Amino acid sequence: MTLALHHCLILAAVLFCIGLLGAFSRRNAIVVLFSVEIMLNAANLNFIAFWRYGTNPELLHGPLFTLFTIAVAAAEVAVGLALVIAVYRHFRSVDLESLDTLKE
């Protein structure tokens, strides 16, 4: 059995839905960051799948977009974890629902 484009797209859609569900339903900030990473990996899978099964795969547009996305994801993790650490030092919790200081 060969892997077709629609198999890759279905897998990417499932990964994106899992990440979206995790980002919307969890209260822990670290789990929300992991969920965003899963969604970015689903987008990377789409880039690679469309590049691989496209009309001109020797142009390397898919891997180039994927490398940029990985770099953005690494920066997002660094900034996100720095924010989580700062919030934990101030509130002693990473529960997103307990952070209501700015609500007023």
Image (tube, rainbow, N blue to C red):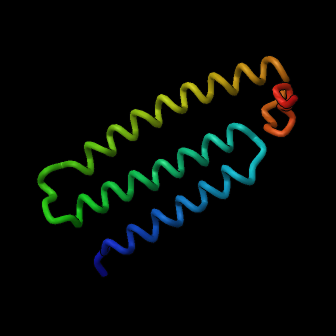
Q: Quadrant of the N terminus?
A: bottom left
Residue drawn 79% across the image and 37% down it: 96
Question: What percent of the width, then of the height, locates residue 76?
Answer: 52, 32
Among all residues in the image, which is located at the extreme bottom?
1
- Vertical placement of 2 versus 92: above or below? below
- The quadrant holding residue 55 is bottom left
Residue drawn 20% across the image and 64% down it: 54
- Vertical placement of 83 versus 54: above or below? above
Residue drawn 66% across the image and 49% down it: 23
Left or right, 88 with reference to 44: right
Left or right, 76 with reference to 2: right
User: How many numbered markers are drawn?
Assistant: 0
Left or right, 49 with reference to 72: left
Q: Quadrant of the C terminus?
A: top right
Question: What percent of the width, then of the height, locates residue 27?
Answer: 78, 44
Residue drawn 78% across the image and 32% down it: 94
- The quadrant holding residue 84 is top right
Question: What percent of the width, then of the height, locates residue 20?
Answer: 61, 55
